[in-house]
Structures are given as C-alpha cells and as structure tokens.
C-alpha cells in the first residue's frame, strides 16, 4: 500500500468514431484529461455526410421526424417549411423545466463528453460545427447549469440535455470557475460565437442517454474503488477482532468458483497471514460480517465486468432518434434513447454497494460492543483510569454509521420498475435510468460515509488490539495502511468531535488516496 501521487500531466481523449472507455469520461470529468475532437478528414467527412443528406431531404420535401414534424405525440403535425429552422430552438426552450440540485461541474463535464461521444458516431445528422462547439465549451470550462431532476430516461434525457443545447446557443447559465454566469456573457468573453442549430440538431443533442450514462461512468469508478477499500477495511476489522484468517483459505474458496469473490478472498489472504492466528479458546467461526465478507463484497466484484460492458456499450452508441444512415441514405425511426441497460446496471450497482454499507455497519457493531470484540474496551474508547467513566469513544459514530446505512438500504428499491406513461401515451414505457443513476450516486455517497466511519473504527480497534497484546502486529500491508490512517486520524484517547476526521477521510476516499491492491 502506498499513497497515490498526483498525475503530473493531463492526457488528451480524442473524440472520433473509435470506442471510448469509462476511464476516458471519468478523467475528463475530474480534470485529468482534455477532450479533443479528431481533425481526421475522413472522420469529419463522415459527420458532414449526415448533415448534408438531411439538407438534401429538406430541399426535396422529405418528411423527417423532429425536422419537418412536431415532437413526440405531435409527430403528426407538419411544420411549414418557413418554420423548420425555428423548431430546434423551440425544443430546448419548452424543455427548460428542470428542478432539483444542479449537477456539479465534474458531473456536467461527464455529461458533455458522453453526448459528444454519441454524436461523433456519425448517425445523428449533425454538423461538425456542433461537435466543435461542445469541445470548445469543455476546453473553455463553460459548463451548462443542468438541473438534476426531470428525466424519465426515454425519450432520453430530454429536459436536462435541453440546458446543454441552450448554452451552445448562448442561452441560460453556465458554471465558470465555480461561479454561475449568463451563458451569453460567458461565450462572448471566451470569444465563442453562439450556434444557430440546424434542423435536427436540437433533437440530436437532447434525445439520448448522455446524462444517465455520464452518471453511470462516475458511479462505476467509485464502486470499483469501494470494492477494494471495503476489503482492506474488512482485513483491519478482522485483525482488530482477533479474527480467524483461515476463513479466507485458498482451497476453501476454490470450491465456489465466483471469480470476483475469489479475488476478494485472495486480497484478504495478502493482508491476513494465517500463521498469526491461534485459537486459544476463541470462537472457531467468526460472525458472518467477517467470515462472509468475500461473499458480500464479491457480489459487487463479480458484477463490475457486467456493469462495465453495459455502460461502455451505451457510451459508444448512437442513441438519438431518428438514426441518420447517410451511407445508404435512409432515415431510421427507432427507440435507441431508451435507457434500460443503464437503468438495470444502476439499480443493480446500488443494491450491491448498499450491501457493502450494511456489511461494514455490522462489522462496526461487533467492534464497539465489548460482548463481541474479544477483549477490547466498550465503544473502543481509549480512555483509561478514572476518566474512562466519562468517555464514550465511538458510541455516537456507530449510531451515525447506522443511519447512513439505513438510508442507503432504503434507496435500493429499483427505479426501473417505476415506469410512467408520459407525453400523451407516446412515451408509454420509459426506463427511469437517470433516476436510477442519481439514486446509485447517493447510495455510493452514503456508503463512502460508512467507510469513513469504519476507517476511524478500525484504526482505533487495531491500535487497541496492539495495546491489549503488544506482541501482536499487523502484517506489512496493514501496517502501512495504519501508518497512512495515523497521519490523518489521531487515536481517540479522549472524546472529541469526529466530523473533521470524517470529512478528511471522505476526501481521501474520493481522491483514491490509498492504492490498495494490484
């Protein structure tokens, strides 16, 4: 275990028709990478063909949904030719009805990058100028102020993405260096000319799954790290409880071939050498929150490859409607804006992650209870002598961790089963993918708070175990983790306010401060 050093240089993610990974979006979101639109002539020609084909259809009086017709249930309404150019601007205008908290800058950068990725596939009938405008805004740090609530996940993320469309045209507001500024002013001061959208471009920007997919990329990154961190916390909890390291034996796990679960057990074997454990009258079997930890964490570890596949397939898709097949000169009307795969992935991920919170909450309950912690003080108080009577150690921290766990578990109801019929029963089956993704991020946030509480707890518990038995010492990797924790969190010898410690540890968790397992 060693601390992760800051990345010395930013990398560049090139946007063209090639496949992107979750890490590309996360790095752009976190400011570790820049987005660059490919200048390859063949790529730009492929994009232009779609827009040119649509222009020709319009000149030949072709009927194209959302270009020469109204939107959604209004697809039966024909738009007069002289009003076609105004239609995209009406689309983003009447969808400007979002509410709730605004997406933060990192989330907003992810949304913009994901939408850019989809439009770069070349099946949306947009101009190269539109793609360049999204890249310009990212480069200038002008991020649309996007309300987080108002999408049912089909026809895609219409309302939140309307805020991106409006800002491209110099309307509404942006984040600039963390401050809200009128988009018209921000674009003017950055030397960026507002767009006038071409006929299908409003629909192409808005009618897709960019918001839910962006949030899913960020959620995956956090869940992947949590699986490793919860494993390390479990190792420290087992040591503090004087647990039985033989529960993670390689042969034992070879008979149940879930690869992710086996990996978690292997990590625990690295941290907990079996030769240190002696029974000496202790329980033969630890309680489930220790003994079955690989089985709990392993569910997430085994699900992560599926989640990656679903998220990256959506990231690398053209997901608006209609699809413009310029090569064969066809307009294909479908439903690729439906976010069912992301909804399912996010509903599954939040369930698996909430189970991590529940696991660690149970470990903490054992650690603070003198009936179950094998000789450690009640509430893991470090106070001794007469002052022990007035000190309560981690009593309140355990209550807070329980509250955060309960809230995480409450949010595991799958959002995808709450489909609503909307928009005059045109959108009569919708994915709820964006709500599922927002729920998942909240479950991740709450679980990270539980992990922060457990990091304080295991740091205290291991210190107390070594005080009870000075001959006992953590294995090298756990010792390094304890050293790193000790640099941030002092042992609790006298009651103190723990909120500052928790907030610091949350920063450490979210910045991937500890490199855990190869």
Image (cartoon, rainbow, N blue to C red):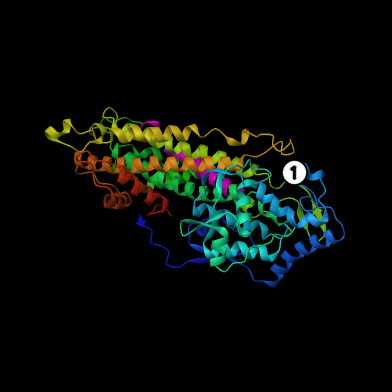
Residue 65 at x, y percent in the picture: 79, 50
Based on the picture, tell me whether residue 307 belongs to the magenta stretch.
yes
Q: Is residue 377 above or below residue 45?
A: above
Q: Quadrant of the N terminus?
A: bottom left
* Outermost residue to the top: 371
Closest to the observer, 289 or 106: 106
Q: How many marks?
A: 1
Instruction: Identify the residue at image location x=54%, y=52%.
Output: 145
Residue 474 at x, y percent in the picture: 28, 47
Q: Quadrant of the C terminus?
A: bottom left
Identify the secondary structure beneath mark 1: helix
Residue 446 at x, y percent in the picture: 43, 40
Q: Is residue 216 above or below residue 49?
A: above
Q: Which residues are magenta?
A: 286-310
Q: In the picture, residue 135 is in which quadrant?
A: bottom right
User: Would you say 201 lies left or right of 481 here?
Assistant: right
Q: In the picture, residue 239 is in which quadrant?
A: top left
Binning the other alpha carbons within 10 Å of mark 1 as few (below 14), some (14 to 19) or many (20 upward) gives some
Based on the picture, tell me whether residue 39 belongs to the magenta stretch.
no
Instruction: Identify the residue at image location x=60%, y=42%.
Output: 150
* Outermost residue to the right: 60
Q: Which residue is mark 1?
A: 72
Closest to the observer, 447 or 85: 85
Q: Magenta segment, principal secondary structure?
A: helix
* Residue 157 visible somewhere in the drawing: no
* Residue 171 visible somewhere in the drawing: yes
Residue 195 at x, y percent in the picture: 66, 62
Closest to the observer, 422 or 325: 422
Closest to the observer, 215 or 85: 85
């Amino acid at each position: 275990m060693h601390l992760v050093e800051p990345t010395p240089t930013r990398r560049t993610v090139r946007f063209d028709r090639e496949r992107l990974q979750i890490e590309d979006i996360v790095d752009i979101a976190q400011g570790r990478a820049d987005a660059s639109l490919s200048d390859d002539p063949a790529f730009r020609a492929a994009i232009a063909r779609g827009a040119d084909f649509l222009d020709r259809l319009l000149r030949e009086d072709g009927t194209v949904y959302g270009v020469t017709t109204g939107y959604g249930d209004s697809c039966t309404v024909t738009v007069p030719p002289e009003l076609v150019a105004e239609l995209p601007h009406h689309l983003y205008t009447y969808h400007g009805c979002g509410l709730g908290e605004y997406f933060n800058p990192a989330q907003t950068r992810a949304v913009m990058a994901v939408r850019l990725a989809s439009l770069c596939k070349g099946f949306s009938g947009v101009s190269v100028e539109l793609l360049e405008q999204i890249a310009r805004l990212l480069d200038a740090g002008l991020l649309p102020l996007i309300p987080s609530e108002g999408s049912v996940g089909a026809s895609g993320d219409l309302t939140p993405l309307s805020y991106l469309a409006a800002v491209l045209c110099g309307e509404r507001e942006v984040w600039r260096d963390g401050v809200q500024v009128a988009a018209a002013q921000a674009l003017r001061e950055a030397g960026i000319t507002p767009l006038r959208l071409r006929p299908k471009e409003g629909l192409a920007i808005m009618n897709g799954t960019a918001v839910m997919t962006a949030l899913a990329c960020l959620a995956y990154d956090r869940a992947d790290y949590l699986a490793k961190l919860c494993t390390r916390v479990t190792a420290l909890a087992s040591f503090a409880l004087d647990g039985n390291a033989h529960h993670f034996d390689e042969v034992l796990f070879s008979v149940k071939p879930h690869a992710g679960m086996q990996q978690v057990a292997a990590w625990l074997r690295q941290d907990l050498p079996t030769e240190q454990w002696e029974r000496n009258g202790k329980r033969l079997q630890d309680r489930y929150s220790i003994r079955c930890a690989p089985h709990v964490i392993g569910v997430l570890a085994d699900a992560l490859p599926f989640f990656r596949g679903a998220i990256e397939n959506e990231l690398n898709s053209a997901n608006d409607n209609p699809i413009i097949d310029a090569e064969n000169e066809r307009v294909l009307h479908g439903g690729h804006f439906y976010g069912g795969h992301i909804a399912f992935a996010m509903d599954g991920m939040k369930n698996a992650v909430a189970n991590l919170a529940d696991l660690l909450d149970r470990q903490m309950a054992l650690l603070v209870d003198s009936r179950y912690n094998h000789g450690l003080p009640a509430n893991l108080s470090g106070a001794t002598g007469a002052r022990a009577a007035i000190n309560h150690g981690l009593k309140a921290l355990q209550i807070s961790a329980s509250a955060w766990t309960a809230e995480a578990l409450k949010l595991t109801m799958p959002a995808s089963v709450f489909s609503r019929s909307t928009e005059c029963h045109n959108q009569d089956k919708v994915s709820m993918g964006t709500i599922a993704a927002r729920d998942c991020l909240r479950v991740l946030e709450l679980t990270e708070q539980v992990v922060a509480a457990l990091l304080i707890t295991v740091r205290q518990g291991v210190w107390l175990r070594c005080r009870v038995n000075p001959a006992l010492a953590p294995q090298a990797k756990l010792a390094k983790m304890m050293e790193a924790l000790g640099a941030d969190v002092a042992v609790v010898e006298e009651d103190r306010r723990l909120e500052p410690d928790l907030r610091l540890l949350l920063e450490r968790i979210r910045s991937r401060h500890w490199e855990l397992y190869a």
